[in-house]
Amino acid sequence: MTHGMRADSYTPRPDGDGGLRDTAARYALLPLRIFLGVTFVYAGLDKLTDSAFLKDSGAGSIGDMMRAVRDSSAIPALVDMALESPVGFGYAIAFGELAVGIGTLLGLLTRIAALGGALISLSLWLTVSWAAEPYYYGNDLPYLMAWTPLILAGAPLLSVDAALRARRRHGTF
C-alpha cells in the first residue's frame, strides 16, 4: 500500500480561468445572498404590513409575543428592554430586516448588511427561538450561521460593492 499526497483535490487557478469549477467557486455565495436578501426583505415587509404585529397588545402583536417569550429567553433583560416600547422595537426590527435584505440583494455594504442580519438573527435566537427543543428546531440559529460567509467574504460578484471596487481599481472613481 502506498501513501502519498492526494492529487485529486481542487484549488481554483489564480487567473480564474479553470472553467466550470472556477465559475462555480466564484458564484458560490450568490444563492445564499439571494435567499437571505429575499427572506429578510419579505420578513421586513410582512411585519410592516401586518396591522396586528405592530401593536402593544392583542393577538399576533409584537408586545404579546415578547411577553410570551420573556421567561423562556436566554436574556430576559433584552426582552424587558424591547418591552419598554414594543411598537418601536417592532418597527426597528422590520426596518432593520428591510435594510439588511436590500443591502444583501444589491451587494451594497454587504459585510455591514450581513453583520446586521447576523445581529438580528442572534437577538431573535436569544429571545424568541431560545426555548426550542432540540435547539436545531429554532430557525434563527441557522440564519445566524448563514450570515457568517457573507460577513467574511462580502459580495465579490454581481454587486454594487464589486462595481465600486472595480471603479477604484481602474481610477474612474
Image (spheres, grey):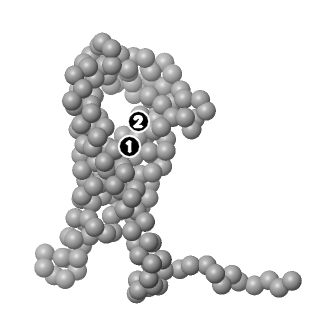
Mark 1 burial class by Cα count in 10 Å: few <14, some 14-19, many 20+: some
Question: Which residue is the extreme one toward the right?
Answer: 1
Position of the C terminus by quadrant: bottom left
Give the quadrant of residue 80.
top left
Question: Which residue is the extreme one toward the left?
Answer: 172
Figure disc tally: 2
Which residue type does callout 1 highlight? Leu
Which residue sits at x=39%, y=68%? 27
Q: CA distance from mark 2 to mark 1?
A: 6 Å
Q: Nearer the viewer, residue 47 or 115?
A: 47
Label 2 sits on residue: 123
Which residue sits at x=56%, y=79%? 10
Q: Secondary structure at mark 1?
A: helix
Q: Secondary structure at mark 2?
A: helix
Image coords of residue 46 (percent x, y): 27, 33
Q: Is residue 150 visible?
A: no
Which residue type does callout 2 highlight? Ser
Image coords of residue 112 (percent x, y): 30, 54
Residue 119 is labelled as 1
Q: Is residue 60 visible?
A: yes
Which residue sits at x=38%, y=20%? 65
Which residue sits at x=41%, y=34%? 124
